Amino acid sequence: MTVVNGYKQNDNEEKINILNLEELEERAKQIIPTGGFGYIAGGSENNWTLKANRQAFTHKQIVPRALSNIEDPQLDTNVFGIPLKTPIMMAPTAAQGLAHSQGEKDTAKGVAAVGGLMAQSTYSSVSIADTAAAGNGAPQFFQLYMSKDWDFNYSLLDEAKKAGVKGIILTVDATVDGYREDDIKNNFQFPIPMANLTKFSEGDGKGKGIGEIYAAAAQKIGPDDVKKIADYTDLPVIVKGIESPEDALYAIGAGAAGVYVSNHGGRQLNGGPASFDVLEDVAKAVNGRVPIIFDSGVRRGSDAFKALASGADLVAMGRPVIYGLALGGAEGVQAVFEHLGDELKTIMQLAGTKTIDDVKKTDLLNIKY
């Protein structure tokens, strides 16, 4: 156990046994301090959209296919020109030091071990360079919470390019903080500095709530900002926080190289739709022009299959990975990805799909239980 500013961080490094990803939450709750756990697990207001993210996967069904003459399904895919061993990626998730002393470094190691794609957050506990180094050459994206201060933005983008990231994820659904009642009840303030916030007026985040940190971020984000970042970095820019076909088209028109369908895991606009319920409409509007990343509520291999069959090219996870990190460090992260991958392979076999491309061509039933 490591203690920083009175906050206890687990430092276990061990393989963990997993029955399913949903049960990890309760196990992690026993290890992560109350304030940190509330920040990680909580949604906004009464958690309606957070819960809807899980329920939405019941709205579509996978038809079992017999006599398909396949065996040994394969998870390999290629997205944004990056060859990957799995279509499951790490969602950009802030302050992973709340779960484990090694934070994003261990997450990067675990994701690299399964041949996946890691996305690191502006508000990470570890610097861009250190997270990239921990991945040891494995592909990574950098997620930008755009600041009002463009010197700060340029500095982060410069560091990301120097670290060799393959793309920039621009989050556009967090111009203000969602009303997160768990943080209020726990009077939660970040006990651990955020490594990327140390050079400018944002300070380092320590001793602040997420609302105070977001206050330094840009409240006004438009299509010109997408183009500005793409032109400056010469990297693909993926716009995260898309929930409508119209916004997907605005993003592509502004030069986005990818669209990221997400409602921030139910942490922002409570009362909005589950991300899975809007995925198909967004995918129809995009019509294959750019890749689509999807997250929010993924806990099962069947969830990942349904997302891929509904238009996603990559499926991202956040909370379950952080729970695995808390329980077992890099090996815990690896175990989470391996478990979901094994579940996905089982579903693929039973659905008669040999490859991820086969999954993407699968028609689902649409019966809203």
Image (cartoon, rainbow, N blue to C red):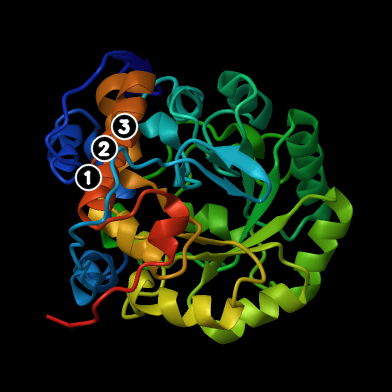
Q: Give the residue pinned by disc 1.
A: 346
Q: Where is residue 310? Give x, y as percent.
A: 40, 70
Give, as a three-letter code, the residue at label 3.
Glu
Q: Earlier in the sequence, mark 1 or mark 3?
A: 3
Q: Is residue 46 above or below residue 244?
A: above
State left or right for residue 135 relative to residue 201: left
Disc 2, disc 3: CB below 8 Å? yes
Disc 1 vs disc 3: Cβ atoms closer than 8 Å? no
Question: Where is 175 relative to 116, above or below?
Answer: below
Q: Residue 110 placed where, x, y %?
A: 43, 25
Residue 191 in view: no
| Distance of label 2 from label 3 (alpha carbons) | 6 Å
Front label number (1 vs 3): 1
Q: Which residue is mark 2?
A: 342
Kind of residue indicated by mark 1? Thr
Image marks 1 and 2: residues in contact by CB distance under 8 Å: yes
Distance from disc 1 to disc 2, alpha carbons, whole Å, reads 6 Å
Which image quadrant is residue 252 in?
Answer: bottom right
SS for dot 1 = helix
Q: Residue at x 65, y 39 (%)?
A: 197
Query: Mark 3 sits on what residue?
Result: 338
Q: Which circle, 1 or 2, is nearer the viewer?
A: 1
Quadrant of the snapshot with the N terminus: top left
Q: Residues within 10 Å of mark 2 (few under 14, many from 20)?
A: some
Residue located 13% across and 40% down the image: 26
In the rendered image, residue 107, in percent from the top left (x then y), is placed at: 44, 29
Q: Nearer the viewer, residue 59 or 182?
A: 59
